[in-house]
Amino acid sequence: MNKSRRFFGSVAAVVAGISVLSLSPVVSADELDTLLASMEEVSQQANAKNEEVKQLEIDLENQGKELEVLEQEVKDASALVDQAKSQEDQYKEQINRISGTKYKGTLVDPITNAISSDDPQQAIDRAAYLSTLSKKTQGLLGELSDSTRQAAKARNDKSRALAEAKHKRHDIEQKHKLLLKEREELEEQTNELAAQVDGLSEQDRTRWIEKNEPVLDFVAQEFSIPSGGSETAKAAVAAAMSKQGAPYSWGAIGPDAFDCSGLIYWSYQQAGLTVPRTSQAQMAAGTPVSREELQPGDVVGYYPGATHVGMYIGDGMLIHASDYGIPVQVVSVDSMPWYGARRF
């Protein structure tokens, strides 16, 4: 919680500085540089926190699905235990009826039984039959008992897994509650940032939009996806390229607005492949590739912690949803601090 307070405290301080600068009637070149740098700092912090919130919500949803599966597995395992125990009990009763003895008792001494019987041979035959039956049934009962024990163990294992999953979900729910409060504060800060961007003059706003040095004439080019990359990756590139100029929105996954990881997620969805939703998760999945190995469709991460991502389109260029007030645009793959790249 102290870490969160420090985060929002630092963001609030930067936003306050932005407000002072933006309210000045005349902003010098140096002051404008300071303003834009401060806005960049707030934006990066807000984007990182937003990715964290999204990932936790995904974890919570996945944990809920896991709980549903485990609860059903426990029910199924319990039913198997009941079934095995019922079969075992029924067989015990059947044996007792056939042998005329209690399952846990002992058979009468066959010699004593033969002497006291009116038909000694019949008594001997019956004793032999019961002895054989006893050995067979003991073996079968042992198998049934083993089945019951195995089913009970499986149920207990599932029950323990369910208890652990519930404990994990409880922890996630507690973190989620805290993050919901943090997101409310985050929304206040991002709204303030949005207001500052919207309040920039046309000239200053252009500087903000061009902070990553976009290829401004790229839209007018006849774009053809370079060779390399799978058909799925090429389809994802085509989908992303179709969204040039779409507005940025925190947490958006299209089709009309995007954040950085949302553009990647949506583009690959159009290509028939589901990739992770957040930037950090995208950088933890797929196959790692180096800067020299990049192919169209590779996802490139930027900044410490992979708080930003874009899609490589070939020829040293990248398409990304950059920041509030900046439309989806094409920039150099080296325009931001490199984190890593993944191939899906």
Image (cartoon, rainbow, N blue to C red):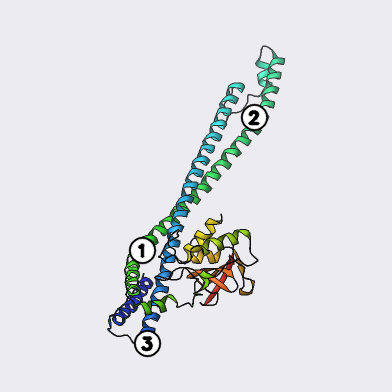
Please state which of residues 38 and 62 is positioned toward the viewer in this rendering.
38
User: Which tag, 3 or 2, sits closer to the chain's start?
Assistant: 3
Mark 2 or 1 closer to N-term?
2
- Most extreme residue toward the top is 118
Q: Label 3 sits on what residue type?
A: Ala
Residue 324: % across, % down: 40, 70
SS at mark 3 in the image: helix
The residue lying at 65 percent from left, 16 percent from top is: 116
Q: Which residue is mark 3?
A: 29
| Residue 150 at x, y percent in the picture | 58, 42
Q: Residue at x 69, y 22 (%)?
A: 129
Residue drawn at (36%, 77%) of the image: 202
Rendered position, 130 above or below 218: above
Residue 276 appears in view:
no
Amino acid type for the residue under numbered disc 2: Thr
Front tag of 2 and 1: 1
Q: Pointers 2 and 1 in contact (CB under 8 A)?
A: no
Please tell me which residue lies in front, 177 or 11: 11
Image quarter hosting the C terminus = bottom right
**Label 1: how many residues lie within 10 Å, few (<14), some (14-19) or many (20+)?**
some
Residue at the spot of label 1: 178
Q: Earlier in the sequence, mark 1 or mark 3?
A: 3
Q: Which residue is mark 2?
A: 137
Could you say where residue 128 lies in the image, as x and y percent from the top left? 70, 23
Q: CA distance from mark 2 to mark 1?
A: 61 Å
